[in-house]
Image (cartoon, helix red, strand yellow):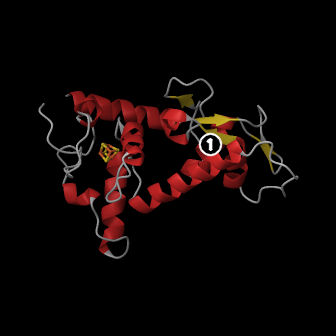
Amino acid sequence: MAYTGSAHGLTSPRPAIWSDAGACLGEDPELFSPDGTLGKWVQVIADAKAICGRCPVRDRCLEWALDNHEDHGIYGGLTEDERGNLRRRQARNTRQAVRKPRGPKQPPPATLREFFDRHASHTTGGHLVWEGAKTPEFRQRQLTPNQLSFLVDRGHEWDGPIHRLCEVRGCVQPLHLADVQERLQRAAAGAKAVA
Ligand code: SF4
C-alpha cells in the first residue's frame, strides 16, 4: 500500500516494508501517543503495549525509533522514557566495552540486571553479544545467557526453549529472543496481518 505515515498514524515516515505489518495498523493512533504516564494514561499505555506485544515487527519498530531518536509516543512496546533509559544503558555498555580491560575488580553485581549488563555488549544493528561465562551463575542459580536475558527483560520465567529471532549468532538482545508463548503470539499476529 502507499505509505504516508508511521505504523500507528504519527507523522514520521517509515519504510513501508516492515511498518505495514505493524499490529497497530487500524488501531486508534492516540493509543500510541499518550500525553502523560499517570491517571487515565496508565491504561492507555498498557493497551498500546499489549498491541506491541503481539506485533510481528516489534524489534524493527524499536530499532527504528531508537535510530531516529523518536521522542514521543510508543514504539516497539516502549514509551519515550523507556527508550531513553534503553539508550542510556546502551551508551553505558558501549563505554564499558570500549574501556576494556575494566581495571580494578568491581564489587559483585547487586541485581540480575546489573549482572547481565556487565557481561553483554552492544554491537551494531542493535544486537547484544554475551561476553561472560557460557553458563552464567548468579546467586547460586545457573542460567544460559538467553535465559538470563529473557528473565531480566520480561521479569518472569520463560516457557519452553528460548529461540533467537535474529540472524546474529550468539545475540542475547532480549528483543531478539522469544520463548514458546511469544513465538505462538507472533505467529498468530503474523497470520492476522496477512489475512
Ligand atoms: S511495535 Fe507497536 S508501535 Fe511498532 S509497529 Fe508494532 S504495534 Fe505498532
The quarter of the picture where residue 42 lies is bottom left
- Classify residue 72 as left or right of residue 149: left
The kind of residue on which mark 1 rests is Ser
Q: Residue at x 30, y 73 (%)?
A: 40
Q: Say which element carries label 1.
A: helix
Res 157 seen here: no
The quarter of the picture where residue 73 lies is bottom left
- Classify residue 103 as left or right of residue 32: right
Q: Residue at x 73, y 46 (%)?
A: 99
Crowding at label 1, few (<14), some or many (≥20) Cα neighbours within 10 Å? many
Q: Nearer the viewer, residue 36 or 12?
A: 12
Q: Nearer the viewer, residue 92 or 115?
A: 92
Say which quadrant the N terminus sits in.
Answer: top left
Q: Residue at x 76, y 31 (%)?
A: 134
Q: Nearer the viewer, residue 13 or 60?
A: 13
Q: Residue at x 63, y 27 (%)?
A: 170
Residue 20 in the image: state x and y as whole percent: 22, 35
- Classify residue 81 as left or right of residue 146: left
Number of numbered callouts drawn? 1
The image shows residue 51, relative to residue 44, as above or below, that is above
Residue 19 in the image: state x and y as whole percent: 26, 37
The image shows residue 12, relative to residue 183, as above or below, that is below
Say which quadrant the C terminus sits in.
Answer: top left
Q: Which residue is mark 1?
A: 149
Residue 115 in the image: state x and y as whole percent: 73, 50
Residue 5 in the image: state x and y as whole percent: 18, 45
- Classify residue 168 as left or right of residue 74: right
